[in-house]
Image (cartoon, rainbow, N blue to C red):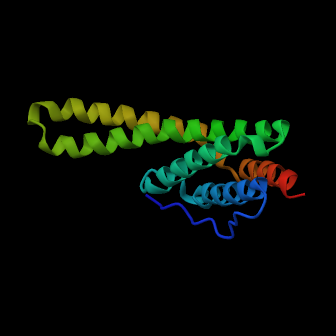
Amino acid sequence: MARPRDVSGLDCEEPFELAAARVVDVRAAEVFAYAERVLSTEDIEPLHDMRVASRRLRAALEVFRVCFPKKRYKAAIKPLKELADALGERRDRDVAIVFLEDFIAEAPSGDRGRLQILVARLREEQREANEALSPLVSEESLADLRGRFDDLLGAVRA
């Protein structure tokens, strides 16, 4: 799992809103950093890292909610929640598949066929979850989300 980036430049003498903007800016950048390989089902770590980063960003937004204009906050958090939910749907299938594939090797031979059928079903659900996630991580959608965060942070920095 990717470690959270340090938030540099925090100063206890600066306004709370500016500190909030710095933290949210770094956490948002973490989310966008994993988008390129997030749809891979061969390497599931980028999806996991993006999901964790989205959770960190949501937590930061909740902590600093009072610092942001309500309308801009809602405009940023709503699509972030949608993205996080879609990442979670895909991640649930990834975890189950990895677990079952490891388990199959140790399972009694009579159970392996049924377990392989279950893995095949999970792979289909994984594919469907990827289809639902795909438009949310498209260049256009991510650019829109990035713009919403730029707008949110701009309101504080102005």
Q: Position of residue 137 (x, y in %)?
A: 65, 49
Displayed quadrant of residue 104: top left
Q: Which image quarter holds the N terminus?
A: bottom left
Q: Residue at (78%, 40%) from the top-left corner?
A: 73
Residue 139 appears left or right of 123: right
Q: Residue furthest right?
A: 158
Vertical placement of residue 19 versus 60, above or below: below
Residue 98 appears left or right of 24: left
Q: Residue at (58%, 40%) from the top-left corner?
A: 84
Q: Which image quarter holds the C terminus?
A: bottom right
Q: Position of residue 129 (x, y in %)?
A: 52, 37
Q: Residue furthest front?
A: 13
Q: Is residue 135 visible?
A: no
Vertical placement of residue 103 versus 37, above or below: above
Q: Is residue 23 visible?
A: yes
Is 30 or 73 nearer to us in this picture? 73
The count of marks equals: 0
Q: Position of residue 138 (x, y in %)?
A: 68, 50
Q: Position of residue 32 (x, y in %)?
A: 64, 57
Is 30 or 25 nearer to us in this picture? 25
Is 10 or 54 nearer to us in this picture? 10
Q: Residue at (85%, 55%) from the top-left corner?
A: 154
Is 125 or 48 nearer to us in this picture? 48
Vertical placement of residue 6 versus 40, above or below: below
